[in-house]
Image (tube, grey):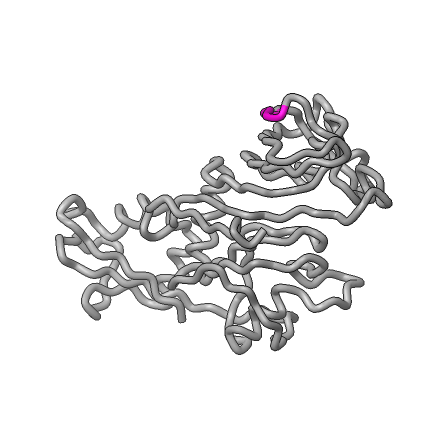
Amino acid sequence: MKQIEYRIDEADDGITVKELLLREKISNNLLKKAKMGGISVFGEAVTVRRILHAGDILILKLPEKKSDGIEAMDIPLDIVYEDDYLLAVNKPRNMPTHPSKGNSLPTLANGVMGYFKGDFVFRSVNRLDRDTSGIVLIAKDQLTANTLSQGMRRGDFVKKYRCTVEGSPCPDHLLIDAPIRRENEDSVKRIVAPDGKRALTEYRVIKADGNVAVCDISLYTGRTHQIRVHMAYIGHPLVGDFLYGDRESGDFDLTCVSISFTHPITHKRTEISIEDKS
């Protein structure tokens, strides 16, 4: 049973539980779960019509079921952030985020289930490809997951990556605004095309030697393979990129080094970073 707590301040004195939950963007599905688990103020069960006052502590209890089909494994995790609502893990390269058909490798999800002794629902807010390392943000409850997903769709997330590309991009700083879509219905490959979805990628060269360059990249949208597609589009594919560049050009190097977002509960701007580890 997951418990969410709201402390009512002077600014919210006099509003109803329903008004507060609507403001907090609680979905009808979550509200039904809260009603099943219980809505209370100071331990007293209340309805959504209850008027709240400064100093009240409103508690929602959300019943949860553990993730079926994800085996708990004792895999060491590099945890870079954790609070009552979120877990952020530095995923290593060559580890899938989530189990998938035909994959036999241990995944990050298996390790997280092991960390919580199997009593957990695995909800990754962002997902990294197997060959991409870096920060994966995991919500500990459905409310947190839904709120963060809504924020991501609104463009509230800023994700920063570091990668190595072929050649030296010129100019050394550019915002790429080019729509992306699937190459064809059956392909995993993406292309830049006028009928694609808008995609915004900002790169900044931080080191170059003529043959390769290390770039910091900020993503303002979350299209599949966005960095790989956009850097190849401007003539500088990622080193070792078998799909959009030259597999033999070197070791593939792409890491999510920071994520910035509005915390779903505290509403404070939060940044999680591993830049000093990259």
Q: Where does residue 159 sit, x and y in percent of width and height?
A: 53, 42
**Picture residue at 57% right of the left edge, 75% below the top:** 114
| Image coordinates for residue 72, horizontal then vertical, percent | 61, 75
Relative horizontal placement of residue 235, taking residue 22 as reference (left or right) = right
Q: Quadrant of residue 232 in the image? A: top right
In this view, 120 is above or below 6: below
Q: Is residue 175 magenta?
A: yes
Q: Nearer the viewer, residue 44 or 170?
A: 170
Residue situated in front as seen by the camera: 254 or 45? 254
Residues shaded magenta:
172-176
Q: Nearer the viewer, residue 15 or 228?
A: 228
As for residue 260 lying within the magenta part, the answer is: no
The percent position of residue 182, horizontal first and vertical second, equals 75, 35
Residue name at image x 50 percent, y 42 percent = 152
Q: Is residue 124 left or right of residue 264?
A: right
Q: Is residue 28 left or right of residue 185?
A: left
Q: Residue at x 21, y 70 (%)?
A: 43
Residue 142 x %, y %: 46, 58
